C-alpha cells in the first residue's frame, strides 16, 4: 500500500498507521475529505476545527495548490492552539478510504463523484476498521448517479452511503451554517444520529428526506425554483428600471409583497441594491452560472427519468446556456446584465 504523505511530521511514538487502525473506543477518529473547492475547502476547515484535536483528517484534491493551501492554513491554527500533526495528504482516494471511518466528498458533478467512488472501491474490499465506514457525498448530482454509488457500496458491504447535498453557498460553508438535505436508508436511530452529528460539524440544519437519492432529489427541486426565480427577478428588475422605477424602492416593495424570494432579497442582481450581493462586486464569487446551469440540467434529466413534464425548464436552460457563454465564472445573477445587454 502506498504511504500517505503527512503534512507535518508525525510524532515519533505515534506512527500514522497505529493511529488510523487504533482499536480505541473513540469513534470516527480518522476522517477523510475529498474535494477542497469553493465549498469543500471551508467545510473541511470547519470539520478540522470541530473534531477532537487528537483526531486525524486526511485530505485529497487533484488540485495540489488547494491541498497545500489547506495544510498551510490549518497548520497555522494548529500551531497557535498547540495542537499536533493532524492533517495528512493522501495521494489517492483509495488510500484515504482505506484509513478513514468517515469519508466526505464535495465534487463538481456526477462524473467526478462516480470516478472518485469507483477509484475508492475498485481495488477489492476496503480493509475493515474499528467502525463501519460512513460515506457522505455533499455534491449536487442526479439521483440516478447517487443511487448507483450507494448500491456499489451497500451491495459489497463496504459501509453506508448517504447523499447530503448542501444549501447556503460559500458564505454558509465558511461560517459553518450550511443546511444539508440527506438520503439514508435507515429511518431509525444509529445511522441517522451518526450522520447528523457529522453534518453538525459543517452546518446548522439537516433534513432527512428519505431513502438514498432523496437528498439530491430535494436539492434539485430547490435549485429548479432558484434557477427560475433568478431569471424572473432579473427580468422584473430590468423591466421596472426601464419603466423608470428606482431599483431599491422596487426591491423593497417586492420583498414586502408576494414576489419576495431569495434572488430579490439576498442575491439581488442589480449592482448597489444589496451591498453584500455578488452584483455589487462585479458579479464575483457567489454561485457560478455554470453550476446553476449544471443543476438545471440535472433537474431536467431527473424529471425526464420520472416522466415529469416541466413547462419552463427548456426556456430557462436556453437562458443559462447563453449567459454561461458570455459570462462564464460570474455569479448566476449576471443574468440581469445579460438581459440589459440584450434590451434595446
Ligand atoms: P469546485 O469546483 O470549486 O470544487 C470541486 C473540487 O473538487 C475542486 O477543488 C476540484 O479540484 C476537486 N476535484 C475534482 N475532481 C476531483 C477528483 N477526481 N479527485 C479529487 N478532487 C477532485 O465546486 P464547489 O463550488 O466547491 O461545489 C462543490 C459541489 O457543491 C458541487 O456539486 C456544487 O454544485 C455544490 N454546491 C455549490 C455551491 C456554491 O455556492 N459553490 C452551493 C451549493 C452546492
Image (cartoon, rainbow, N blue to C red):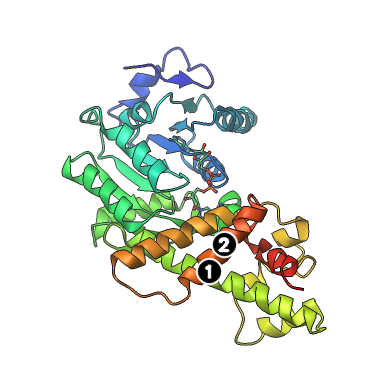
Q: Looking at the picture, how far across and down is residue 165, in whole percent?
A: 43, 55
- The residue under label 2 is 320
Q: Secondary structure at mark 2?
A: helix
Q: Residue furthest top?
A: 12
Q: Looking at the picture, how far across and down is residue 329, in whole percent?
A: 64, 49
Q: Quadrant of residue 258?
A: bottom right
Q: How many labels sit on residues? A: 2
Between residue 44 and residue 323, name the one nearer to us: 323
Horizontal relation, residue 146 to residue 7: left or right: left
Between residue 71 and residue 289, name the one nearer to us: 289
Q: Looking at the picture, how far across and down is residue 324, in whole percent?
A: 60, 55
Q: Is residue 172 visible?
A: no
Horizontal relation, residue 169 to residue 158: left or right: right
Between residue 248 and residue 86, name the one nearer to us: 248
Q: Quadrant of residue 80?
A: top right
Q: Residues within 10 Å of mark 1 (few under 14, many from 20)?
A: some
Q: Is residue 307 visible?
A: yes
Q: Are marks 2 and 1 in contact (CB under 8 Å)?
A: yes
Q: Quadrant of residue 168?
A: bottom right
Q: Work out how far the residue at label 2 is from the one at label 1, CA to CA, in angstroms.
A: 6 Å
- The residue under label 1 is 316
Q: Residue furthest front?
A: 344
Q: Quadrant of the C terminus?
A: bottom right
Q: Secondary structure at mark 1?
A: helix
The residue positioned 67% from the left and 81% from the top of the image is: 255
Between residue 277 and residue 42, name the one nearer to us: 277
Up/down of 15 relative to 133, above or below = above
Amino acid at each position: 500500500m502506498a504511504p500517505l504523505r503527512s503534512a507535518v511530521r508525525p510524532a515519533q511514538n505515534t506512527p500514522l498507521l497505529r493511529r488510523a487502525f487504533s482499536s480505541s473506543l473513540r469513534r470516527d477518529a480518522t476522517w477523510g475529505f475529498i474535494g477542497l473547492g469553493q465549498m469543500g475547502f471551508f467545510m473541511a476547515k470547519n470539520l478540522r476545527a470541530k473534531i477532537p484535536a487528537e483526531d486525524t483528517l486526511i485530505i485529497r484534491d487533484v488540485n495540489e495548490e488547494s491541498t497545500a493551501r489547506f495544510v498551510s492554513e490549518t497548520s497555522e491554527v494548529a500551531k497557535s492552539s498547540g495542537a499536533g500533526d493532524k492533517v495528512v495528504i493522501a495521494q489517492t482516494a483509495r488510500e484515504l478510504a482505506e484509513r478513514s471511518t468517515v469519508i466526505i466528498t464535495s465534487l463538481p458533478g456526477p462524473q467526478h463523484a462516480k470516478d472518485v467512488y469507483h477509484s475508492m472501491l475498485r481495488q477489492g474490499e476496503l480493509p475493515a476498521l474499528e467502525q463501519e465506514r460512513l460515506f457522505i457525498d455533499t455534491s449536487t448530482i442526479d439521483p440516478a448517479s447517487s443511487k448507483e454509488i450507494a448500491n456499489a457500496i451497500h451491495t459489497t458491504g463496504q459501509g453506508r452511503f448517504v447523499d447530503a447535498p448542501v444549501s447556503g453557498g460559500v458564505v454558509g460553508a465558511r461560517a459553518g451554517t450550511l443546511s444539508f438535505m440527506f438520503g439514508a436508508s435507515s429511518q431509525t436511530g444509529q445511522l441517522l444520529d451518526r450522520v447528523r452529528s457529522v453534518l453538525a460539524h459543517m452546518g446548522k440544519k439537516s433534513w432527512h428526506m428519505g431513502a438514498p437519492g432523496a437528498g439530491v432529489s430535494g436539492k434539485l427541486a430547490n435549485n429548479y425554483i432558484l434557477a427560475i426565480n433568478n431569471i424572473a427577478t432579473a427580468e422584473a428588475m430590468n423591466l421596472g428600471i426601464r419603466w423608470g422605477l428606482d431599483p431599491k424602492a422596487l426591491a423593497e416593495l417586492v420583498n414586502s409583497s408576494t414576489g419576495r424570494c431569495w434572488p430579490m432579497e439576498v442575491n439581488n442582481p442589480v449592482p448597489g441594491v444589496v451591498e453584500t450581493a455578488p452584483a455589487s462586486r462585479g458579479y464575483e464569487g457567489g454561485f457560478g452560472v455554470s453550476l446553476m446551469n449544471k443543476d438545471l440540467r440535472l433537474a431536467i434529466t431527473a424529471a425526464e427519468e420520472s416522466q415529469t413534464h416541466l413547462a419552463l425548464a427548456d426556456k430557462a436552460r436556453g437562458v443559462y446556456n447563453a449567459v454561461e457563454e458570455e459570462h462564464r465564472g460570474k455569479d448566476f445573477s449576471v443574468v440581469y446584465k445579460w438581459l440589459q445587454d440584450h434590451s434595446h
